[in-house]
Image (cartoon, rainbow, N blue to C red):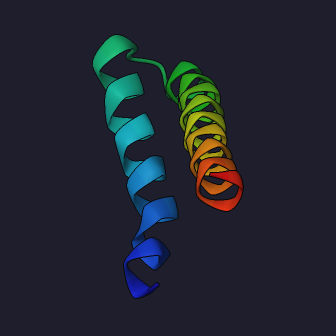
Amino acid sequence: MSIYIHLPILIVVVSLVYSATRHDNWNKILHEALHWGFRMTSFLVAIGLILFALSTFL
C-alpha cells in the first residue's frame, strides 16, 4: 500500500512536464496540467473500479 502514496506526486509531475512541453505561458501550463491530471486520475480510477468489479464478481 505504501507505493500508492507516490501516485499523486507522479500524476502532478507528469502532467506538469507534459504541459510544459506544449506551452510557454505558465497560465496555459497550469491549465493544461489540471486537465491532464484530471484525465489521468479518471482513467486510473476507472481501471481500478473495473479490476475491483472483476475480482469481486468473477
Q: Is residue 44 left or right of residue 3?
A: right
Residue 42 drawn above or below residue 22? below
Residue 54, image x, y percentages: 61, 48
Q: How many marks?
A: 0
Residue 40, image x, y percentages: 53, 36
| Residue positioned most to the front | 58
Along the line of sight, the residue nearer the viewer: 49 or 40: 49
Along the line of sight, the residue nearer the viewer: 14 or 54: 54
Residue 58, image x, y percentages: 62, 51
Q: Is residue 5 left or right of residue 51?
A: left
Residue 3, image x, y percentages: 37, 78
Question: Residue 2: which quarter of the image?
Answer: bottom left
Along the line of sight, the residue nearer the viewer: 14 or 23: 14
Which residue does the image show at 38% across and 17% down from the upper left?
Answer: 24
Along the line of sight, the residue nearer the viewer: 1 or 53: 53
Which residue does the image show at 57% across and 49% down from the upper left?
Answer: 51
Which residue does the image show at 54% across and 28% down from the upper left?
Answer: 36
| Residue positioned most to the bottom | 2
Q: Is residue 52 left or right of residue 14?
A: right
Which residue does the image show at 45% across and 63% down from the upper left?
Answer: 7
Question: Residue 10: which quarter of the image?
Answer: bottom left
Residue 20 drawn above or below residue 54? above
